[in-house]
Image: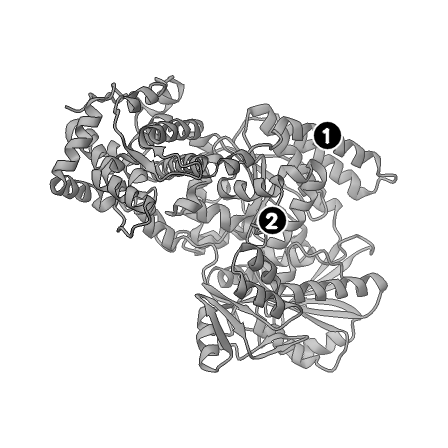
């Protein structure tokens, strides 16, 4: 006989107000089994991991992790059921064989818990949906979240084929006290889809942590020691007061920054929800945004701050600013360029950062938008593990206009659910606001109030004008453009593709003071070029930089003149941010031109370029200083772009997690890594080949160029690539000091993202 199950009834609003029965008797429930079963093999102290103890602890941890988003009871059930299959005598035999060093094929166990939930909640209680919310995380806690379509059929087939073993599970469940009532489902459609993924996250993290506690208790101890947000807010106030006092002279820029800062402090007292932070270049957005997030978090009981940024260069700068204010030990920087060492000598702080990157259990996290959003749509246990820690947090999306339009509908939908269901405060930060709530083509934010953190932002744009714009309507050839560049001592030219940059460079090949920046150069090479360009600018020497969009964000250069090939409107503004950046001139000059021989990139970039071109033909150059222009631009862009081009929402409604994960990509093209012969590349490559691991890979990263897979296919046929592993090659072709990786690029639309 299985235990009676109570399912609470009521709508979502009443559910949020009701206090539920605590899952306090989980331990008693598990211990009632009194079976000599184990979850894991012995640890270094030769102690087996008892299964009832593991189920108990995972249920308790999962409940605690899920309580902030209202999923505590569901997560407790998932924790209790996730390893029920390990009561199978065949699994216990497998564990014993593993312990004795025997070769024994793995024995699946995740389907057992899912099948028991099907038996209990579907066949007995006859609730056709409720069981899936718990069964899917249980079924996928090792292999990944499954698709819901076949789950019931798989469970039914399993029960029919495994009758004798299932009897053991039934007896075990019958001996347990009555479980706590399950609240109503927290929502339907995509809100339910996110809820299940968050449950999955809570279960996976709880399972990993309790397993870690068994096998490596020293690692578990290393996870502690983070400062809390109240401490960080106090540090911020102290550092900010010193920062303000150190300003001897008060310029107009300083006055604007102070107004932005004070507006952020006032707004932080406002209610949780969605906020816009609209600040022109140079307006102190980084420090003031942190002030809002910290104060708001402290006042409203938020648990952490997550800052997501699209560009690695900006991430590194932002994290460094935060560390100087809050301390090195307070900020977790999590992106592909930061891979902590696994050396035995690493100290406890280094270990704490490495471990926190697994589940974001830190007070301040600075990461990439790719890491954040692809985790929010993943089916992978490792990537989803961190998600439950987003509940009751402040999420600050910097350069929010960079979110790809073709996946904007699912992106905004998941953000709305985080705000409405998970207690998240969302900050949309940029100088070029897309105004998601004001367009009729996006209903995800239309029902929500979006508040301005800095109401007087229009005045600030007017006050911080640093450039004049010149709009060229007539197309210009590479030859004519090269003549203009020759007549300028210091100029930055930004083009839409690597191929366009190479065409213009060829026209300037005889000049010694011409530099090139694109992702054809490895990171170490780009860093050297940027340092040389910055030094020449500082000393007033001639310098002409031909670049792709890689220079537009997070690169601290200050040119008197910038040429920008017509592109999406927000990219033009980013380019202007490299012009008269420090305000040393009365006004810099940014020229927007149409390359006669330039190629138009594909996809949403092409649509954005075309919308910007039409808008700029209708408006004078002065309109580029008006922040309302960008609202109009984005409304036109959203009108003409399929905002769910991959049909992701359909698969979210169907709870098809593998397909959702496959379709949701912030960066569309898949690339491979190529080590180029630059600097100390060969030394670090030898080290990696000898000792492949995170530490050696991190040291090799500055010498890697990413190329698209179709390029790799061509280069392999030409004998230019030496395979080193899956998606990893050594470049054995030419690598030029100015051009970087030299090879025939067959796709003229090859765009730097």
Lateral position of residue 35 relative to residue 469, left or right:
left
Report crowding for label 1: few under 14, some 14 to 19, many 20 or more residues within 10 A (C-alpha).
Answer: some
Q: Which residue is mark 1?
A: 237
Residue 353 is situated, as x and y percent measured from the top left of the image, at 58, 42
- Residue 710 spot, x, y in % from top left: 44, 72
Where residue 120 sits in the image (x, y, percent)? Answer: 19, 29
Q: Quadrant of the C terminus?
A: bottom right
- Residue position marked by numbered label 2 in the rendering: 432
Identity of the residue drawn at 39% across and 34% down = 47
Q: Secondary structure at mark 2?
A: loop
Disc 2 crowd rating (10 Å Cα; few below 14, some 14-19, many 20+) is: many
Residue 690 quadrant: bottom right
Query: In the rendered structure, which disc, 2 or 1, sits on the residue that comes first in sequence?
Result: 1
Residue 59: name its quadrant: top left
> Closer to the camera, 624 or 354?
354
- The picture places residue 682, in percent across and down from the top left corner, at 61, 70
Tell me which residue sits at (58%, 50%) in the image: 343
User: Is 257 left, or right, of 268 in this rendering?
Assistant: right
Tally the marks. 2
Can residue 551 be seen? yes
Provide the secondary structure element on which disc 1 rests. helix
């Amino acid at each position: 006989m299985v235990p009676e199950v109570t399912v609470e009834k009521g709508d979502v609003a009443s559910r949020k107000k009701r206090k539920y029965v605590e899952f306090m008797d989980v331990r008693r429930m598990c211990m009632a089994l009194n079976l000599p079963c184990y979850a894991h093999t012995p640890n270094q102290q030769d102690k087996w991991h008892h299964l009832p103890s593991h189920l108990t602890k995972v249920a308790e941890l999962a409940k605690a992790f899920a309580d902030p988003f209202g999923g505590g009871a569901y997560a407790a059930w998932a924790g209790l059921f996730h390893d029920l299959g390990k009561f199978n005598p065949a699994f216990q035999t497998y564990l014993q064989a593993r312990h004795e060093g025997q070769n024994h094929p793995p024995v699946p166990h995740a389907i057992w818990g899912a099948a028991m939930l099907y038996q209990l909640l579907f066949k007995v209680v006859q609730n056709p949906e409720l069981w899936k919310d718990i069964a899917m995380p249980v079924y996928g806690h090792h292999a990944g979240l499954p698709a819901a379509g076949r789950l019931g059929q798989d469970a039914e087939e399993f029960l029919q084929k495994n009758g004798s073993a299932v009897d053991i599970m039934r007896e075990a469940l019958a001996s347990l006290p009555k479980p706590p009532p399950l609240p109503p489902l927290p929502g339907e459609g995509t809100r339910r889809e996110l809820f299940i993924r968050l449950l999955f996250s809570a279960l996976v993290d709880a399972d990993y942590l309790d397993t870690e506690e068994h096998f490596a208790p020293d690692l578990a101890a290393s996870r502690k020691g983070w400062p809390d947000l109240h401490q960080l807010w106090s540090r911020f106030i102290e550092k900010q007061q010193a920062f303000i006092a150190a300003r001897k002279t008060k310029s107009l820029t300083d006055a604007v920054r102070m107004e932005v800062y004070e507006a952020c402090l006032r707004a932080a007292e406002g209610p949780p929800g969605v906020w816009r932070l609209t600040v022109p270049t140079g307006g102190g957005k980084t420090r003031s945004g942190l002030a809002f997030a910290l104060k708001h978090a402290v006042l409203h009981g938020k648990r952490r701050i997550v800052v997501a940024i699209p560009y690695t260069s900006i991430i590194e700068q932002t994290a460094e600013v935060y560390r100087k204010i809050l301390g090195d030990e307070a900020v977790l920087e999590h992106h592909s360029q930061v891979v902590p060492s696994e050396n035995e000598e690493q100290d406890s702080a280094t270990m704490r950062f490495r471990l926190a990157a697994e589940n974001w259990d830190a007070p301040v996290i600075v990461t990439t938008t790719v890491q954040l959003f692809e985790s929010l749509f993943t089916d992978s246990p490792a990537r989803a593990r961190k998600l439950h820690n987003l509940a009751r947090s402040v999420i600050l999306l910097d350069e929010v206009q960079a979110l790809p339009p073709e996946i904007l509908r699912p992106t905004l939908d998941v953000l709305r659910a985080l705000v409405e269901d998970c207690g998240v405060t969302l900050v949309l930060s940029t100088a070029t606001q897309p105004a998601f709530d004001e367009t009729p083509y996006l209903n995800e934010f239309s029902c929500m109030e979006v508040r301005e953190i800095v109401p007087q932002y229009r005045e600030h744009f007017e006050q911080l004008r640093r450039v004049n714009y010149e709009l060229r309507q007539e197309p210009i050839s590479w030859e004519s453009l090269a003549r203009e560049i020759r007549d300028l001592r210091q100029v930055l030219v930004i083009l839409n593709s690597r191929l366009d940059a190479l065409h213009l460079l060829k026209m300037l090949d005889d000049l010694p003071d011409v530099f090139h920046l694109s992702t054809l150069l490895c990171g170490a090479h780009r860093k050297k070029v940027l340092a040389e360009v910055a030094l020449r600018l500082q000393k007033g020497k001639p310098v002409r930089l031909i670049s792709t969009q890689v220079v537009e964000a997070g690169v601290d250069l200050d040119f008197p003149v910038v040429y920008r090939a017509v592109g999406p409107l927000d990219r033009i503004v980013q380019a202007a941010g490299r012009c008269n950046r420090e305000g040393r001139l009365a006004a810099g000059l940014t020229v927007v031109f149409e390359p006669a021989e330039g190629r138009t990139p594909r996809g949403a970039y092409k649509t954005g370029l075309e919308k910007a071109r039409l808008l700029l033909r209708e408006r004078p150059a002065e309109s580029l200083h008006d922040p309302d222009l960008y609202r109009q631009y984005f409304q036109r862009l959203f009108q003409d772009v399929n905002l769910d081009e991959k049909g992701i929402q359909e698969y979210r409604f169907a709870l098809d997690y593998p397909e959702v994960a496959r379709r949701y990509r912030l960066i569309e093209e898949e690339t491979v890594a190529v080590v180029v012969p630059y600097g100390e590349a060969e030394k670090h490559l030898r080290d990696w080949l000898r000792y492949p691991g995170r530490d050696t890979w991190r040291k090799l990263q500055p010498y890697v160029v990413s190329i698209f897979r179709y390029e790799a296919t061509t280069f392999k046929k030409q004998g230019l690539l030496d395979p080193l592993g899956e998606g990893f090659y050594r470049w054995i072709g030419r690598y030029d000091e100015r051009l970087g990786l030299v090879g025939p690029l067959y796709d003229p639309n090859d765009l730097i993202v």
